[in-house]
Structure formats: structure tokens, C-alpha cells
Image (spheres, grey):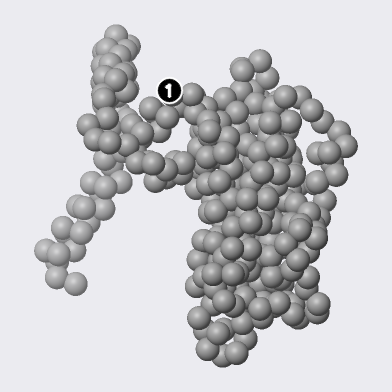
Amino acid sequence: MNKAVLAVATMVLITGFSAPATAAQNRAALSPEEQARRQAERERRRQEMMRMPNPIAALNSVWIDELTWIEVRDEIASGKTTAIIPTGGVEQNGPYLATGKHNYVLQGACDGIARELGNALCTPVLKLVPEGDPENISYPGTISLRQETFLMVLQDVGNSLKSQGFTDIILIGDSGGNQRGLEAAAAKLNEHWAGSGATAYFIPEYYNYADVGRYMAEELGYVETVDDGHHDDFYITSLMMVTSPEAVRYHQRVEAGKATINGLSITPINQALEVGHKLMQFRVDATVKAIHAAMGGETGGNREGHSRGHGR
């Protein structure tokens, strides 16, 4: 390497490593009074920004990551102090469904739940969840967190929401492997928040796939006659199609003559979407009812009864 280039590179490295230390030294050299003055000035500027009016019309969305910080601030101020933390997963789901199956379902479900509640926003779907031993993945595409990692992520998200003004934190999971961690996180958060006025709610009723299957068969008349042996079925496919027909490879399956699952056809697309929308609304209604019951202090039979179902 050219000596001049080496000298420049060395200076960059030295400068880069020494900059944080120099900044820390400069702060340490300030008197307590000057440090307090600077902190007060930073807080004054923050408060000034917090009072800044929204210069444009707000977006009609319930997703925090789609909103600007000003829009979130204004939604909280208007009374939307409930936040929903939806958890999905990335795992194998047979030859047709995307690995993010649960995440696609939650895009439709959380949106519907928040809008039906009327006072809620959704965090981004937490897509990485426990799917088994991270060091021993069975199928390509699966990504797993340890239970303790999942628990810490949920606690950090919950605390982030509480610190900005949300008072009711709802935890839901579209996958069976999420339920234990969600329940533990709600308990940990409530222990930490005792007396603060904020509460975390684990809603097991959202994970009600057994009820969804019965509703589909008994009320909509769609009965699966065979089991194709995939981690897939008609109701999960139709629910995913509400968000994205491509996520179930709709057009490729039609072209290949594979547009069925467990004896039911997913064609025509409008018919499958109609079923998907009805199933989605069924889940939204059941979850909203459970949230109202939980916030009203109701526990026991109904809540426990819906907490068990198909492992999807």
C-alpha cells in the first residue's frame, strides 16, 4: 500500500476511535451548571417540536410505522391510547404459502381490530418469533428466536409504547408458538408497571383457528374433505389472500392445475376472497369482544375456552 494512503487510513481510524472518547471528555469537562443548562436547552427544543402543528393532512392508517411521529402524537392526544402488538412468524408452510403466512394474516386482522376498537393503533407486525431451536432449523426459510429473546423484545416494545403515552397494550399472536411468550410478557410488563395506570393484555382468543374452522364449515358451508398433508388449509389460504393472493401463489397454482387445498378450490379468486373477508371479520369480531371483556375485568371460562385451537 502507498505510504501516503496508509498514513491517511491510519489517521481516519485513529480519529474514528478517538472521537467518542473526545466527546465524552468534553462533556466531563463541563461544569454541572453548564451540563444542566445544555440539558434544559435540549428539552426546551424537544417541547417546542412537540407543540409543532401538523403542516399537512394526516394519513388514514392505524399502523404506527406508516404514520409520521406528528400523526402518532396527535392520535394519542385524540384518545387512541391502545396499542396492539401483533406477532406472526417465518416458517415453512408447504409448497404454496409464503414463509410469512402469519404476517400476511395479521396485516388484515390487526388493521380490522384497531379500526373496530376505534381507539387503537398497531405496531409493525413482529415477524421474528420462536420457531424452535435457532441452531437446528429443519426447513430452509425458517427464522427463529429463543423464547427469552422474544420475551425481551416484547417487553422493550411494550415499554416503548408506554413511555410515549399508550396506556393499554394488547398482545396477540397468529402462531401457536407465540402464545407462551405473549402471556409471560404481559405478566412481566404488568409487574413492572404496577400503579402506573398502564396495563398489558394477552388476548389468547385471537388465536382461535379451531373456531374459524368450525365457522367456515357450519356457517359458510366450506368443508375440507381431505388432508393434503401440508402446513396449510383453506381458511388460512383465504385469509392470506385478503392481503396478497401472490402470497399463496394463486396465479402459479391456477396455471399448474394446483388451485386446491384439502379438497377445496381457491378459484374463482373473487369467491375465495369473499370467504377470506368473512373469516377475517369473524376473527376481528371475536378478538374485539375478548379485548373489551379483558379490559372490563372478565376472566374465566370464555377466555380459556378460546385460547386453545389448531396449531397453525
Q: Residue at x 84, y 38 (%)?
A: 302
Label 1: which residue?
Answer: 77
Q: Nearer the viewer, residue 11 or 197?
A: 197
Q: Nearer the viewer, residue 278 or 98?
A: 278
**144 relative to 2, above or below:** above
Which residue type carries mark 1?
A: Ala
78 with respect to 50 (left or right): right
Is residue 226 positioned above or below 294 on the image? below
Q: Is residue 251 left or right of residue 87?
A: left
Q: Residue at x 54, y 69 (%)?
A: 270
Q: What residue occupies the far right of the structure in this picture?
A: 301
Q: How packed is label 1: few (under 14 Cα within 10 Å), some, or many (20 or more)?
A: few
* Rendered image quadrant of residue 25: top left
Q: Which of these two is toward me, 61 or 92? A: 61
Q: Is residue 138 visible?
A: no
Q: Picture coordinates of residue 62 (x, y %)?
A: 46, 41
Q: Position of residue 13 (x, y in %)?
A: 26, 53
Residue 20 sits above or below residue 164 on the image:
below
Give the percent coordinates (x, y) of residue 111.
Answer: 53, 46
- The residue most toward the left is 4
The quadrant holding residue 36 is top left
Residue furthest top as drawn = 33
Residue 136 at x, y = what percent? 70, 69
Is residue 289 in view from this perspective? yes
Image quadrant holding the C terminus, namely bottom right
Which residue is located at x 32 percent, y 23 percent?
50
Query: Residue 301's image quarter?
Result: top right
